[in-house]
């Protein structure tokens, strides 16, 4: 089993990155873990969208 970590500032960018990975690799997906973190920097909210894809290569 292998893992691939994705980390983006916007959920649409995360979606695009994962879809590109899945379409360019011939693999069996075992699991996908998704997480969102929010931090405050002054009055600005900073988001971090991340996912870990667990897969087996064919």
Image (spheres, rainbow, N blue to C red):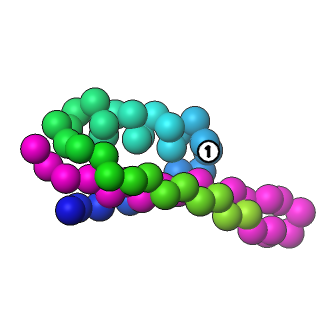
Q: Is residue 15 visible?
A: yes
* Residue 51 in the image, given as x and y percentages of width and height: 48, 55
Does the magenta portion include 6? no
Q: Residues within 10 Å of mark 1 (few under 14, many from 20)?
A: some
- The range drawn in magenta is 39-58
SS at mark 1 in the image: loop
Residue in the image at 46% along x and 34% along y: 16
Quadrant location of residue 19? top left
- 9 relative position to 44: left or right: left
Q: Position of residue 34 (x, y in %)?
A: 54, 55
- Residue at the image position 34 percent from the left and 34 percent from the top: 20
Residue drawn 73% across the image and 63% down it = 38
The residue tagged 1 is 10
Residue 5 is left or right of residue 27, and the answer is right
Q: The C terminus lies in which quarter of the figure?
A: top left
Q: Which residue is drawn at the image coordinates 39% and 53% (left, top)?
A: 31
On the picture, is 15 further left or further right than 24? right
Q: Main secondary structure of the magenta part?
A: strand
Q: Find residue 15 and report its horizontal and vertical position in percent.
A: 50, 37
| Up-down relation of residue 55 to residue 2 (above or below) | above
Q: Indicate the quadrant containing the N terminus: top left, top right, bottom left or bottom right.
A: bottom left
In this orientation, does residue 7 appear?
Answer: no
């Amino acid at each position: 089993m292998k893992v691939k970590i994705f980390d983006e500032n916007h959920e649409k960018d995360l979606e695009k990155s994962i879809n590109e990975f899945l379409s360019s690799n011939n693999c069996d997906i075992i699991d996908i873990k998704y997480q969102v973190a929010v931090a405050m920097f002054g009055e600005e909210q900073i988001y971090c969208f991340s996912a870990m894809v667990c897969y087996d290569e064919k």
